Amino acid sequence: MEYTIRVAQKEDMEQVHQLIQELATFEKEEDAVEVSVQDLKEDGFGKHKLFHCFVAEKNNKIVGMALVYPRYSTWKGPVIHLEDLIVTKEMRGTGLGTALLDEVVKYGDELGVRRICWEVLDWNEPAIGFYESKGANVMRDWDVVQLDQKGIKAYLNAIA
C-alpha cells in the first residue's frame, strides 16, 4: 500500500475536518463536531499553535490523520495527548494506523515527553485491540471527566 505520512499543512485542514466528521459519524455523534475548518487553521497554524498534526496521503488525498497537543502531568512532567488518530474506512487494515501511531511516538520521543496518552471508547474493541497490540495500557479503571461549554457556564453561574 503506497501512502505518505507527513506533517500537516494549513491547506490540509479542510480534508482533516472531513476526517473528523467521518469519525464523529462512526462514533454516532454526527452533530457533535463544533470545530470549523477555519478554527483548525487558526489553532494549528496561527500565532499560538495549539496542536501538531500528521496526515497520511494517498494519491493527493488525505486518508488518515493523528492530532496531538502538549500537556503536563503533575506525576510525570511533559506529556503529549493524542486527541484523535483517524483512518478512513477504506484504508483500515492497511498498516496506516500503525504508521500514524509510529509518527506520534517518534514525535513524542523527539520532544522528550514521559508519556503519550489518549482515550478510546469502551465499545471500540478493534481500536482497543490495536492499541494493546502496540504495548499501550488501556486503563479501564479510569473515567473521563469533562465540562462542556454549557457546563462551564452553569458552573460559573452557580459560584457567582
Image (cartoon, rainbow, N blue to C red):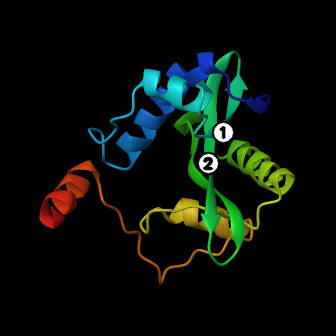
Residue in view at x 68 percent, y 62 percent: 79
Q: Amino acid at mark 2?
A: Tyr
Q: Look at the numbered discs 1 and 2 and tell me whether their residues touch, using CB distance below 8 Å.
A: yes
Residue appearing at x 35%, y 62% in the figure = 146
Q: Which residue is mark 1?
A: 52
| Residue drawn where x is 54% and y is 28% of the image | 16
> For the residue labelled by badge 1, is the local secondary structure a helix, a strand or a loop?
strand
The quarter of the picture where residue 86 lies is: top right
Determine the residue positioned at 41% across, 75% down: 143
Residue behind mark 2 = 69
Measured as percent of width and height from the top left, residue 127 is found at 56, 59
Q: Is residue 146 above or below residue 34?
A: below
Foreground residue among 42 and 128: 42
Secondary element under disc 2, as helix, strand or loop, is strand
Above or below, 108 relative to 5:
below
Instruction: From the viewer's perspective, tell me whether residue 112 is left or right of residue 12.
Output: right
Query: Residue 27 placed where, x, y %?
Result: 37, 50
Query: Mark 1 or mark 2: which comes first in sequence?
Result: 1
Residue 106, can we see it? Answer: yes
Q: Nearer the viewer, residue 130 or 54?
A: 54
